[in-house]
Image: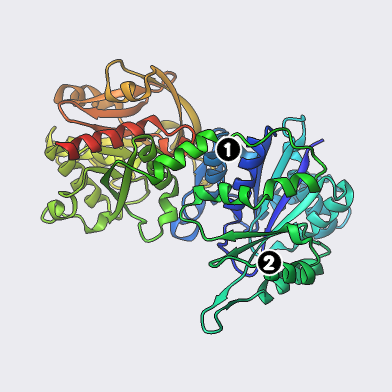
Amino acid sequence: MAKYVFVTGGVTSSLGKGIIAASLAKLLQARGFRVTIQKFDPYLNIDPGTLNPYEHGECFVTEDGAETDLDLGHYERFLNISTTQANNVTTGRIYQTVINKERKGDYLGKTVQVVPHITNEIKRRVQLLGIGNEYDIIITELGGTVGDIESLPYLEALRQLRWELGSDNCIVVHLTLIPYLSAAKELKTKPTQHSVKELLKTGIQPDILVCRSERPITQSIRRKIALFCNVEMGAVIQAIDAETIYDVPMLMLEENLDRIALAKLRLLEKRDPELSKWKSFLQKHKNPKSEITIGLVGKYNELQDAYKSIYEAFIHAGASNECKVKVEPIHSEAVTPENAAEHLSHLDGILVAPGFGERGIDGKLHTAQYARENGVPYFGICLGMQCAVIEYARNVLKLDDAHSTEMAPDTQFPVIAMMDEQKEITNMGGTMRLGSYPCTLKRKTVIQQAYRSLKINERHRHRYEFNNQYLERFEKAGMRASGFNPATNLVESVEVKDHPWFVGVQFHPELKSTVEEPHPLFVDFVKAAKAKKGK
C-alpha cells in the first residue's frame, strides 16, 4: 500500500510548506518512486474559485477542471505531472460532503459531529489517491499553522491515521522557524520548541523537523532542538533561505531529507537521484547569456502571487533561451494614451495578464494598441486576448463601440460575448469553462510553429469568448484566428499579420509550464523579445 508523508507548519505562515513538500517529492521521484502531493486547506470556501486574487493569489486550474490552491502549481512545476480535483481539498468541501450525507440519511439518525464524521471524511480524502496502487508515496500538505482553531480537525484526523496505519507507513515533517535576533546576535530555538509542544498537545510527535532560518544552524543548535523536541538529531533539517525556490530540492538533498524520510518509512533506496535535467535548468537559470525586460500589464500587481504561474513560466522560458527575463509589473490603470510610450517604450515584450471585471480595461486596450502599432512582441492571455480583439475592432475595423458584454452588456458591437452555455448559469463557483480542452491550430501560424504541432490541449477558465459573427471581418482586416476548438469552432487564439510576434490566447498556457518542459508559447515569446532587443 502507499506510504504517507504529512507536512505541517508552525510558528508563522508563509514558511514554504508547499516548496518543502514539492522538494521532498522531487527527490523521492528522482530516486524512482511514484509520488504525488495533495493540499488540504482549512478555509470554508468550497474552492479558491470565488476568492479575490488579493486574498488568495492565483487560482490554479487542473486538467480535470478543478479550481485549486496555487501550491498545486508548485507541485506540477516540480514533479512535471498533472494534478486533479483529488489533490486539493478545503474544509468547505469536507463539511459540504458530510452535510449532504446527513441530508440523505446516510448516518441513520446518528448525531453528526466533528469527531468522528468530519475526521473520517478527512481521512477518506487523504487516502483517496492511494486507491489503485498508483503511487508509492503520497505527500499531504496541511494548510495553516499548528495552533489555528480551523486546523484542529485535520490534526486529529492525522493523529488517528498514524495510529491506524502505523509509524512505518505514516510520518510527519514539521516545518518551523529559527529566528535570528540581531540584537542578541544569535538564533533562537524557543519558537520551534513551543511549536512542537503545540503539535504534541494534539497527540502528534513529529518525525522530522525542517527549520527555516536566515543563518546556518550549528550542530549545538541542532542538538538542542533534537533534545527538547524529542526527535533524532539527524532528523533536524536546516532550510536556509535560498536564492530561488528551485535551489530548495538541491539544498534538501544535501541535508539528506529524502534519505531520512525513506528510512523512517522503512523503504529501501532504489537508486541515486536522477536530477540531470534539474541541474541543467539551474545552470542555465543562474548563468544567462542575455537579459530582456517584459512588461506584465495586469490589475493585481500589488500581490505577485496573483500571477504566480506567469512569473514561473518566464523563469522556465528564460532558462530555455539562456536569457534572464526581468518581469516589470505595470498596473493597467496607470496606462493612458498620453503616457503609454512612457510606460512601455523601453520594454522588449509585453504580456497582458488575465483578469475579470471592468477596472483597468482601458489601460489594457491602450497597451495592446501600443504593442500592435510599434512592433513590440505582444502576448495576451485570456482577458489579454480579449482586449487585443476589442482594440483591433475599435481602431482597425472602426467599430468605435466594440467591447465585451462582460463590461458593456449593451454594446453595439459585442466582439467578445458570453458563451451560450454560460447564459443560464446563476451560481458563480466552479461554473466557468474549466479544465483542458483540445485546440486545432492552422498551419504556418506563429502559434503552430511555436508548438510544432497541429493539435494541442490547454486549460481554460473563462465565461466569455470571441464572437464568431465578426470573424470574417477580422480576418479580412489582418487579425486571423489561428486556433479553434474542434467541437464548437470557438476561437482559441488570434494573431496579427505583418507583426513580429502578436498572439492572443483564450486559454492559460502558464498553467502547464514546468521546469523540465517549459511552455512552448512562453519560450517562443521570450525568443521574439530577444530578437527585438537584438535589433
Residue ID at (72%, 51%) = 6
Q: Indicate how the structure is coloured in the image.
A: rainbow
Residue under circle 1? Answer: 79
Name which residue type carries label 2: Gln
Residue ID at (50%, 55%) = 51
Within 10 Å of the Cα at label 2, are there few (<14), some (14-19), or many (20+) other Cα atoms?
few
Q: Quadrant of residue 219?
A: bottom right
- Residue 102 is at least partly visible in this image: no
Residue under circle 2? Answer: 219
SS under mark 1: helix
Q: In whole angstroms, how far apart are the C-alphas of marks 1 and 2?
A: 32 Å
Q: Is residue 429 left or right of residue 523?
A: right
- Depth check: 71 or 479 in front? 71
- Quadrant containing the N terminus is top right
The percent coordinates of residue 384 (x first, y second) are 30, 41
SS under mark 2: helix
The percent coordinates of residue 68 (x first, y second) are 56, 46
Name which residue type carries label 1: Leu
Q: Nearer the viewer, mark 1 or mark 2?
A: 2
Residue ID at (80%, 39%) = 267
- Depth check: 530 or 17 in front? 530
Q: Is residue 384 left or right of residue 70?
A: left
